[in-house]
Image: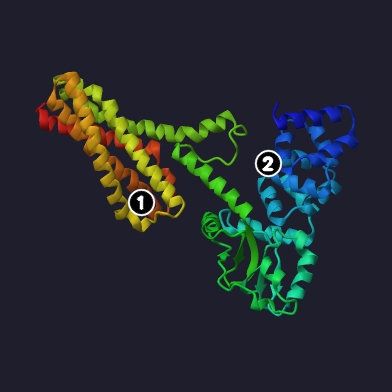
Amino acid sequence: MLERDFEVEKVLELIEQKEFNELKRYLERINGADFPSIFEEIDEEDLIIVFRLLDKEKAAEIFAELDADMQERLINSFSDVELKNVVEKLFIDDTVDMIEEMPSNVVKRVLRAVSDEDRKIINEILNYPEDSAGSIMTTEFIDLKEDMTVAQAFDKIKKIGLTTETVYNCYVVNKNRKLLGVIDIKDLLVAERDQKVTELIDPDIIAVTTLDDREDVAKAFDKYDYVALPVVDKEERLVGIITVDDAIDVMIEETSEDFEKMAAISPNEDGYYKTTVVEHAKNRIFWLLFLMFSSIVTGAVITHYEQAFAALPLLVSFIPMIMGTGGNCGSQSSTLVIRGLAVDEIKSKDFLKVWWKEIRVAVIVGVIMAIVNGIRIFVQYHDIQLGIVVGLTLIVTIMLSKSIGCMLPLICKKLKLDPAIMAAPLISTILDTCSVLVFFNIAVAIMNI
């Protein structure tokens, strides 16, 4: 039996037996990260019993990790006092994330439960654009004044450290709250107590602005290996920080969105099971209709070459292979380029550099596939002319596929569109038409049909 299944059964057994003291002790031994999956397996009445038995600190920590539906279920079961106890323990960014997912009636209850000061901060963060750095920052961090000594810095850390997102980085500001630099907690630990904090700061701090794109912020974490990044306003005043856990959440969301676009599905923030059948169909039908009607062009091209079919019906049997090869080659290139753009390995300005690399790959791959197919056709059909037609078609189609596959995402990026739009289904549809055109033009030219 899996550990989680055992934990769920044990929790349900203790609830049924009304062994609440034993249940409380058992819950203390369970890792906080395991609770969301346990909560999914128990009904609402038992859920609130379990939650009420948790230590307040642990309860708030677990609550922040639950999905929006589970949070809403709990909030609807909470008394006003219980809701206030939970919300007071949450970090501001977690409270903002929760509010963004809740219906208006629940949001009103949550906002009534927070202090006036926190409500003001929450409203300020909610006013930032959804995809900006400001929307995912927290205002709970350690800031030190430039005239502080190390001893004074430690006094402040002791005072507010437990209510901040991280104590590993402390940010030094001047009297106007302009960011001067960052201090690693290790440097404070080994410094003399009467030393000024300005002597310890790293002035070459990487900061982001409130309106920076949050995806770019997530990439900065990957590039610089920071635990947290400071957020400044347009006057370079420190207004918040973004921690690595929030950056990971952004990466997961953006990656999920890119996968959906690459599969020709409209992005959806809800999970697979939470999305209704009708919603799934709605997210997919537009692209499916678009791709279906796009393929009509391919059909028209094939119809145009009916005479070639009549002269050599065998040509038809090679169409699926040529179209499939073109689509596969284009998808390979587009996937690699989209991935390179996503991790900043490839830039929009690298257009010719990327194309030149892909075209050389295409020549090598195309020649090998042409030779293999030429030998197969000669052995199977004893027709060297047909082998040449198919071989040349493969070389040209693969070169065209690799070019289109790498160029379209780069063009999208240049136009400030999401490169993931130009992924497998759309590129395959474009290349189906192109490969059929190439095939029949070469066949007509070489075989005089």
**The quadrant where residue 188 appears:** bottom right
Q: Is residue 167 left or right of residue 288?
A: right
Q: Is residue 35 above or below residue 343?
A: above
Within-10-Å neighbours for mark 1: few <14, some 14–19, many 20+: some
Residue nearest the viewer, comparing 392 with 371: 371
Kindly identify which numbered label has been placed on residue 411. 1
Kind of residue at badge 1:
Ile
Kind of residue at badge 2:
Asp
Provide residue 298's location: percent of width, then percent of height: 28, 31
The residue under label 2 is 67
Q: Is residue 116 left or right of residue 444?
A: right
Q: The C terminus lies in which quarter of the figure?
A: top left
Kindly identify which numbered label has been placed on residue 21. none
Q: Is residue 60 left or right of residue 129?
A: right
Q: Residue at x 86, y 48 (%)?
A: 81
Q: The N terminus lies in which quarter of the figure?
A: top right
Q: CA distance from mark 2 to mark 1?
A: 37 Å
Q: Residue furthest front?
A: 190
Q: Secondary structure at mark 2?
A: loop
